[in-house]
Amino acid sequence: MNDLKNYQKKELPLFIISNILIFLIVHQIIKIDTIDCLHNTAKIISQVFVSTILSAIAFGFILVIECLFTSGFKEKLLYLFGFFGFLNLPGCTIFTEIREKNGDNRFSYQDVVENYPELYQNLPEDGKGRSSYENEKWYTIYSQNRDVPMIQYSQRDWLLCRDIYISTLVMIFSYVVVAIMRFVDFNYQYILFLIFEAGITNFGANRKAVRFAYNVIAYDVTKTQKNEKSNR
């Protein structure tokens, strides 16, 4: 996969356009009439024109987010408001979780210990130092396998879900500003919908991030085991 962020040309614009249409319909800027209007040529032409405008807005929206939000800031927003106390990327706690939960059926804690014998021996006791240490070790393993298709696809899924969540936060902020300035009437149901959407996308991004982190370890451990068998 040459471009991990090709979703910025596909899935993400569709998500933003869908939300813009919901906004326009909820606030009756666009009114849905009878089905007969779909057969009207003028209506169809106008819809194509509107869709073109919405696509331009969506790409502009994405460009602004990319200019204003660094990857680090996106991650802080993702884990600041994350569920279940997630305050760090999964790479910051992955080896502790493997030791305590051993929750991935593709490998065991013993497999990880055998694969990285010094990792747990040098694991710091303090929380902050341990998080940095674990993330550094995880990133080293990831760097060695970053071109593997399985890892690239799981990373892309995480980046997509992360950016959908960030886009939702920006839409919430934009809507509040627009409502305060009285460009539109404030709609409680719509803001609740956006908040619910932010919660769902946050949860999804967290799940995808964990899957991405574990895929890196699973592939590296399995690769080592296959190499050992082939050398026997």
Image (cartoon, rainbow, N blue to C red):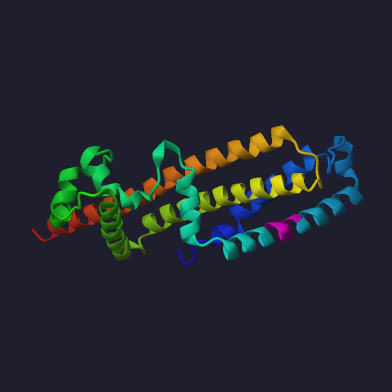
Q: Which residue shows up at 15% across the image and 55% down it?
A: 122
Q: Between 208 and 229, which is closer to the camera in this rendering?
A: 208
> What range of the chain is rendered magenta?
54-58
Q: Which residue does the image show at 75% across and 36% down from the upper left?
A: 187
Question: On the rendered image, what quadrant is the N terminus found in?
Answer: bottom left
Residue located 88% across and 48% down the image: 43
State which quarter of the image contains the C terminus: bottom left
x 72%, y 49%: residue: 177
Nearer to the camera, 42 or 88: 88
Look at the picture and state if 158 lies above or below 27: below
> Does any portion of residue 106 appear in the rendered image?
no
Q: Is residue 56 magenta?
A: yes
Instruction: Work out whether residue 14 can be spotted.
Output: yes
Residue 103: x percent and y percent? 27, 38
Task: In this rendered view, identify the residue nearer to me: 152 or 109.
Answer: 109
Q: Is residue 125 above or below residue 152?
A: above
Dominant secondary-structure state across the stretch colored magenta: helix
